[in-house]
């Protein structure tokens, strides 16, 4: 399966961000991709007041993403914000396109490194996968990457690929952690990990203090933990082929899922 990862810098205006989604989806379709994944917070960047922008999954922003998927023939995965109780929002991934309609609410909220996502965001609870071209795909978001049990849950559900949209926080050692974690999660669950981050902003000054606005370095990691392709810090489109047969081969040679003694 050919997939595309769109490393963009989203801004505070959801309508302008849709223009980026449309442009990048057309490029991915021209490159022969079946799916394009955008970062967490594609709808609006962190550092923006999210509650006034949040929309339900049948609202105008998600409907526009569905139209882009229809126009391009792609499955589009993009981060948005949906309304939640008590004035909070949910950090949601929308996956939509021919034969696919799914959504995932971020389970592990980024309450770390001086940022408290849970102040404004409600946590999800469900493991989500969907099928495309006989490939089962799991969904995870950013800080989820620090919790290997979610990726193993994807594998237990039959997934061969996890998509990991992110808006990674900058800071000393954070790029090294990002690169280590995405490779480790591929090995933990012996599946492909396609990690798409927000590009590093050209001018991070407008973002609220410590808001995670991305560092780039999106990558496609194989089930054996090798990085097959990657981007640098700036905006870009990564197109890569993912072979489900490699999952079978790696699980045969490194049967960590079968050899587990502790679960949960």
Image (cartoon, helix red, strand yellow):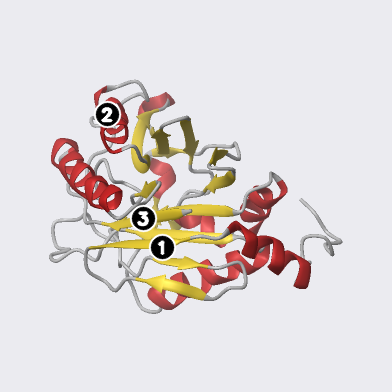
C-alpha gap between disc 1 and disc 3: 6 Å
Give the x, y percent position of residue 96.
40, 33
Give the x, y percent position of residue 177.
47, 74
Q: Which residue is mark 3?
A: 4
Q: Which residue is mark 1?
A: 240
**Disc 3 secondary structure class:** strand
Which of the 4 quarters of the picture holds residue 59?
top left
Give the x, y percent position of residue 114.
38, 61
Which of the 4 quarters of the picture holds residue 259?
bottom right
Q: Which mark is residue 155?
A: none
Total numbered labels: 3
Which of these two is toward me, 254 or 210? 254
Q: Could you tell which of marks 1 and 3 lies nearer the N-terminus?
A: 3
Q: Are marks 2 and 3 in contact (CB under 8 Å)?
A: no
How packed mark 3 is, by other alpha carbons closer than 10 Å (few <14, some 14-19, many 20 or more), is many
**Disc 1 secondary structure class:** strand
Q: Could you tell which of marks 2 and 3 lies nearer the N-terminus?
A: 3
Residue drawn at x 77%, y 67% as measured from the top left: 252
Vertical placement of 177 versus 121: above or below?
Answer: below
Vertical placement of 91 versus 219: above or below?
Answer: above
Q: Are marks 1 and 3 in contact (CB under 8 Å)?
A: yes
C-alpha gap between disc 1 and disc 2: 24 Å
Give the x, y percent position of residue 159.
63, 49
Vertical placement of 90 versus 195: above or below?
Answer: above
**Image check: 197 left or right of 142?**
left
Q: Which mark is residue 67?
A: 2
Which of these two is toward me, 114 or 91? 91
How packed mark 2 is, by other alpha carbons closer than 10 Å (few <14, some 14-19, many 20 or more), is some
Residue drawn at x 46%, y 73% as measured from the top left: 228
**Image check: 123 left or right of 55?**
right
Vertical placement of 17 versus 206: above or below?
Answer: above
How packed mark 1 is, by other alpha carbons closer than 10 Å (few <14, some 14-19, many 20 or more), is some
């Amino acid at each position: 399966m050919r997939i595309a990862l769109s490393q963009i810098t989203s801004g505070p205006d959801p309508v302008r961000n849709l223009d980026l989604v449309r442009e990048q989806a057309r490029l991915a379709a021209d490159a022969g991709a079946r799916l394009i994944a955008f970062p967490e917070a594609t709808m609006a960047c962190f550092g923006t007041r999210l509650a006034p922008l949040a929309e339900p999954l049948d609202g105008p922003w998600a409907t526009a993403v569905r139209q882009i998927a229809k126009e391009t023939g792609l499955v589009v995965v993009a981060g948005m914000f949906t309304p939640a109780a008590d004035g909070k929002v949910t950090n949601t991934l929308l996956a939509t396109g021919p034969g696919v309609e799914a959504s995932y609410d971020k389970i592990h909220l980024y309450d770390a490194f001086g940022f408290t996502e849970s102040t404004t965001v409600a946590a999800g609870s469900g493991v989500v996968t969907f099928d495309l071209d006989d490939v089962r795909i799991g969904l995870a978001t950013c800080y989820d990457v620090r919790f290997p049990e979610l990726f193993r849950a994807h594998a237990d559900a039959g997934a061969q690929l996890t998509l990991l949209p992110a808006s990674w926080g900058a800071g000393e050692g954070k790029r090294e952690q990002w690169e280590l974690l995405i490779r480790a999660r591929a090995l933990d669950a012996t599946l492909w990990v396609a990690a798409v981050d927000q590009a590093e902003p050209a001018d991070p000054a407008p973002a609220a203090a410590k808001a995670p606005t991305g560092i780039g370095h999106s990558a496609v990691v194989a089930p054996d933990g090798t990085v097959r392709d990657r981007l640098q810090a700036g905006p870009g489109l990564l197109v890569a082929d993912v072979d489900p047969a490699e999952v079978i081969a790696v699980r045969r040679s490194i049967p960590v899922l079968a050899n587990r003694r502790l679960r949960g």
